[in-house]
Image: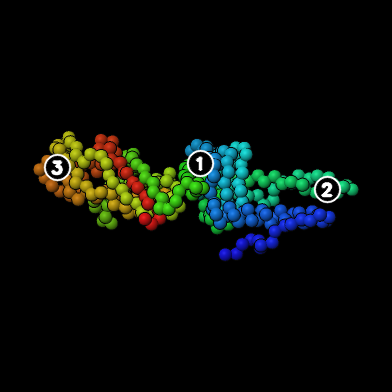
């Protein structure tokens, strides 16, 4: 491991001639060591605040005051709220909202002896800006991510916090859980390549957990499996025989599960899910049925890091 500075440290003696260069070099060494300390012992993340406030359909987001450390160890200190406009693009395009250490801060000048003047202090105000998600981390790897947004039609269409990392919040293995209650539009038929229905599928948003990578997910289905059908095609009690949710797609912020329905008992007759849908005429209504009448919900748990 290569450190940014060597073992040399400043020392002073009586009668020493101190120049601006000597003092600035010593200060630069101490800052380099402080940034190395932050980077190696604490890592990058948010210590306090830096909360993002935004409303879907609007053109601005606001970052509240707070403190954080960027990937290079710089301290990010925001002392007042900052409001920035989302990029004016037709979209849909994803961006990462970041706080970034300003390498060219505002300087305060002062006057010395014999009319000399120069910068006597720097204003270390961080930059708050959007960077394209395709550039992150990459060129934006020195920035502290606060949120990921999607811009559609020049306005904010969604916001998530999967990239956000809080200092001292966890140790691996990290475990979090949640409940996904899809609306009728959140369910869809799971079908074979030939279009034969064998169950239902839904995608759960797990970004609230703040996983850094893809965790090991487990999921279970809650809700009733029986209901009554009254209609011209069929009028009888129905029982859906289901499996536990099958994880078919996973990421740090999303979980896709399928509920297999191997058998449906309508009255005293057993059949496949596809046969039931064709015979009952419920193909278009099944997603509304499981979301509203049966109240299906997915309880998920994710484990990041080995146990």
Q: How far across and how far down the image is residue 87, in percent?
A: 56, 45
Q: Which mark is residue 266?
A: 3
Q: Position of residue 153 (x, y in %)?
A: 51, 43
Name the residue tied to disc 2.
117
On the image, the x and y values in percent for residue 177 come to: 37, 45
Residue name at image x 77 percent, y 48 percent: 119
Q: Is residue 278 visible?
A: no
Q: Is residue 22 visible?
A: yes
Q: Is residue 230 left or right of residue 148?
A: left
Residue closer to the observer: 8 or 294: 8
- Split into 4 quadrants, where in the image is the C terminus? bottom left
For residue 79, what is the image quadrant?
Answer: top right
On residue 156, which mark appears?
A: 1
Mark 2: secondary structure: strand
**Disc nearer the start of the sequence (3/1):** 1
Q: Which mark is residue 231?
A: none
In the rendered view of the protein, which quadrant contains the N terminus?
bottom right
**Residue 85 vs residue 98, the one in the foreground:** 98
């Amino acid at each position: 491991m290569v450190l940014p500075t060597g073992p040399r440290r400043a020392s002073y003696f009586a009668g020493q001639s101190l120049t601006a260069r000597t003092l600035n070099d010593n200060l630069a060494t101490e800052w380099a060591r402080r940034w190395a300390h932050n980077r190696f012992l604490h890592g990058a993340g948010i210590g306090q605040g830096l909360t993002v406030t935004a409303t879907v359909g609007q053109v601005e987001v606001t970052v509240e005051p707070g403190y954080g450390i960027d990937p290079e160890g710089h301290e990010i200190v925001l002392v007042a709220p900052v409001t920035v406009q989302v990029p004016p693009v037709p979209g849909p395009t994803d961006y990462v909202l970041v706080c970034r250490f300003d390498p060219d801060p505002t300087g305060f000048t002062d006057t010395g002896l014999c009319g000399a003047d120069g910068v006597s202090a720097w204003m270390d105000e961080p930059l708050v800006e959007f960077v394209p998600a395709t550039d992150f981390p990459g060129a934006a790897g020195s920035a502290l991510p606060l949120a990921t947004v999607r811009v559609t039609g020049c306005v904010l269409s969604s916001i998530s916090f999967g990239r956000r990392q809080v200092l001292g919040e966890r140790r691996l293995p990290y475990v979090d859980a949640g409940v996904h209650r899809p609306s009728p539009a959140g369910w869809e038929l799971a079908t074979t390549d030939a279009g034969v229905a064998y169950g239902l599928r839904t995608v759960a948003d797990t970004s609230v957990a703040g996983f850094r990578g893809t965790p090991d997910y487990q999921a279970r289905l809650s809700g009733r499996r029986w209901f009554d059908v009254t209609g011209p095609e069929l009028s009888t009690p129905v029982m859906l025989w289901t499996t536990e949710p099958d994880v078919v797609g996973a990421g740090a912020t999303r979980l896709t599960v399928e509920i297999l329905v191997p058998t449906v008992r309508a009255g005293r007759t057993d059949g496949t899910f596809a046969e039931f849908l064709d015979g009952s005429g419920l193909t278009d209504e099944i997603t509304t049925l499981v979301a509203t009448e049966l109240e299906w919900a997915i309880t998920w748990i994710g484990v990041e890091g080995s146990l």
